[in-house]
């Protein structure tokens, strides 16, 4: 007998209080924050869906691992446990620990990119794009066509468009140092990439003699989707699917704050000895000695244990079903979302929900602010605020204006999600009343983290 109710495959062992606030409190708080949800004090947030990165709950065994953390500067046992755990899933020759994913990106792109170079990806995450562009190189995205329509539900909407990739590589001989595939495709609805697609990308990379790297932050969620959706994969162990994904690549960047089930950490991995030497030298400059990177021994232990837990089928079944639960409820309410729901997040299509707000008046930001004011839910705009500013300072509408409800791992219960659903229903009924916003202060790069906004009030 199988029941419909999703039960969390854990019980609660220690609790954190949530501060209850009123709508008036929240309106004051968001105004003081310059209408930027990143600038709020997190105590003023009731349900924090800003990101799934580093916000998950650790397990009893991870906390136990923390007690085993050995803080020796070099060659600590915690480093070797970390190394073994990473290489069990990703048997790359060189594993270079970093304090988080973007540090791995910074080191890699400093080593291989630069002016005149271009890095293709299915879709660059914002820090990945910024780290490529910071070196003077170009970051180009080739996600498959179906992925461009947020309402059409492809099984693998995160895939790379291999034909466009191939044409690009043909047109830019000598300028591409590495091809990237992001699993799952965070900036494109959290949609997965199939094994078949990875195989095709591999074939194209082999043809042009180029290395293929994975941005593997959500590798386990991606592997679960492969198991559920890709013909012939349904009876495989997720571990084995992950190993096959790794076998198709020459290296990876990783943020352990996602599918490492840890609150901090990451790594850079590769098979190329010469590249690894250059990267380790950069690591020593900015992160630390190569057996701890930017991490404490206790962090390495938490990641080592997290990697064992994240590939467990009971965990992944619960994880992906609970994200789907939120997505299905929003679809039933008529709220436009990217379909199917991603692994770690549900993305509301703010441009469709708020057609009266022009993209350059930031419909995603408007919706995110309304969700906070109404119900204390913190979400993240993934649209024109995040991607609209070009390296030359001009501004264009992004491909889509989405609002991401990212679900921290093992943190909120089904009743928290029922509350989120109620708040979304309320805001979507009042969608036509929401104002657009203008930016009154912004940084040249990654402006969404620090920009200040004000509502555009019609006379
Ligand atoms: C796909 C992807 N790549 C890279 C990163 C950067 O990782 P970190 O936040 O650990 O620097 C993230 C973080 O959200 C991500 O989602």
Image (tube, grey):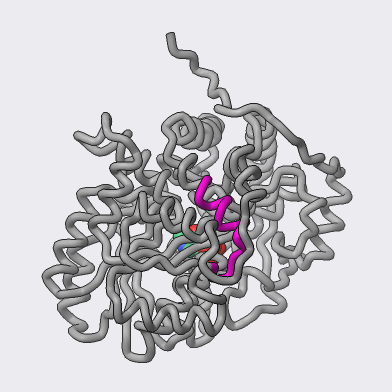
Residue 70 seen: yes
Magenta region, main secondary structure: helix
Q: Quadrant of the C terminus?
A: bottom right
Residue occupying the far top of the picture: 1
Q: Is residue 390 left or right of residue 119?
A: right
Q: Quadrant of the N terminus?
A: top left
Closer-to-camera residue (65/106): 65
The quarter of the picture where residue 110 lies is: bottom left
Residue 117: give x, y in percent of width and height: 32, 85
Residue 301 is covered by the magenta coloring: yes
Q: Relative to 247, does residue 393 appear above or below in the rendering?
A: below
Which residue does the image show at 53% across and 77% down from the upper left? Answer: 389
Residue 457 seen: no
Closer-to-camera residue (383/259): 259
Which residue does the image show at 49% across and 40% down from the upper left? Answer: 309
Residue occupying the far bottom of the picture: 115
Q: Is residue 401 left or right of residue 198?
A: right
**Where are the magenta residues, as a range?**
292-305
Closer-to-camera residue (349/47): 47
Residue 365: give x, y in percent of width and height: 63, 60
Q: Relative to 79, does residue 44 appear above or below in the rendering?
A: above
The quarter of the picture where residue 457 lies is: bottom right
Q: Is residue 377 left or right of residue 206?
A: right
Residue 66: give x, y in percent of width and height: 64, 50
Which residue does the image show at 38% across and 88% down from the upper left? Answer: 114
Count every numbered label the image shows and give the total: 0
Which residue does the image show at 47% across and 71% down from the upper left? Answer: 104
Residue 314 is covered by the magenta coloring: no
């Amino acid at each position: 007998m199988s029941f419909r109710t999703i039960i969390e495959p854990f019980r609660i062992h220690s609790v954190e209080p949530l501060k209850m606030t009123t709508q008036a409190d929240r309106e004051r708080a968001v105004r003081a924050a310059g209408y930027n949800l990143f600038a709020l004090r997190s105590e003023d947030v009731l349900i924090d869906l800003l990101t799934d990165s580093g916000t998950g709950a650790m397990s009893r065994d991870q906390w136990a691992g923390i007690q085993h953390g050995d803080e020796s500067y070099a060659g600590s046992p915690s480093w070797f446990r970390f190394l073994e755990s990473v290489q069990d899933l990703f048997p790359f020759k060189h594993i270079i620990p970093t304090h988080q994913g973007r540090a791995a990106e910074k080191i890699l792109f400093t080593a291989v990119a630069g002016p005149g170079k271009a890095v293709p990806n299915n879709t660059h995450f914002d820090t990945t794009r910024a780290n490529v562009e910071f070196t003077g190189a170009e970051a180009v995205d080739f996600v498959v066509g179906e992925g461009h329509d947020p309402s059409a539900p492809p099984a693998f909407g995160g895939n790379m468009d291999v034909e466009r990739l191939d044409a690009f590589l043909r047109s830019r001989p000598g300028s591409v140092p590495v091809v990237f595939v992001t699993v799952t495709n965070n900036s494109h609805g959290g949609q997965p990439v199939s094994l078949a697609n990875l195989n095709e990308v591999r074939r194209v990379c082999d043809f042009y003699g180029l290395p293929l790297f994975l941005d593997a932050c959500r590798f386990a969620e991606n592997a679960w989707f492969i198991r559920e959706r890709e013909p012939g994969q349904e009876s495989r162990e997720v571990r084995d699917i992950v190993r096959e994904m790794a076998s198709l690549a020459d290296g990876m960047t990783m943020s352990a704050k996602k599918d490492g089930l840890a609150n901090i950490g990451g790594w850079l991995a590769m098979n190329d000895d010469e590249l690894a030497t250059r990267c380790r030298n950069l690591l020593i400059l900015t992160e630390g000695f190569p057996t701890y990177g930017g991490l404490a021994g206790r962090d390495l232990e938490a990641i080592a244990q997290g990697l064992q837990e994240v590939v467990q089928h009971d965990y992944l079944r619960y994880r992906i079903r609970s994200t789907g639960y939120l997505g299905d409820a929003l679809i039933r309410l008529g709220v436009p979302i990217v379909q199917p729901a991603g692994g770690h997040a549900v993305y509301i299509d703010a441009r469709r929900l708020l057609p009266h707000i022009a993209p350059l008046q930031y419909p995603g930001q408007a919706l995110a602010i309304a969700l906070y004011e109404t119900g204390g839910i913190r979400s993240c705009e993934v649209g024109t605020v995040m991607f609209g500013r070009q390296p030359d300072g001009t501004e264009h509408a992004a491909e889509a204006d989405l609002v991401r409800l990212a679900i921290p791992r093992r943190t909120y219960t089904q009743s928290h999600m029922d509350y989120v659903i109620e708040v979304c229903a309320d805001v979507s009924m009042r969608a036509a009343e929401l104002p657009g916003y203008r930016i009154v202060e912004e940084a040249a790069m990654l402006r969404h983290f620090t920009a200040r906004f004000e509502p555009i009030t019609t006379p």
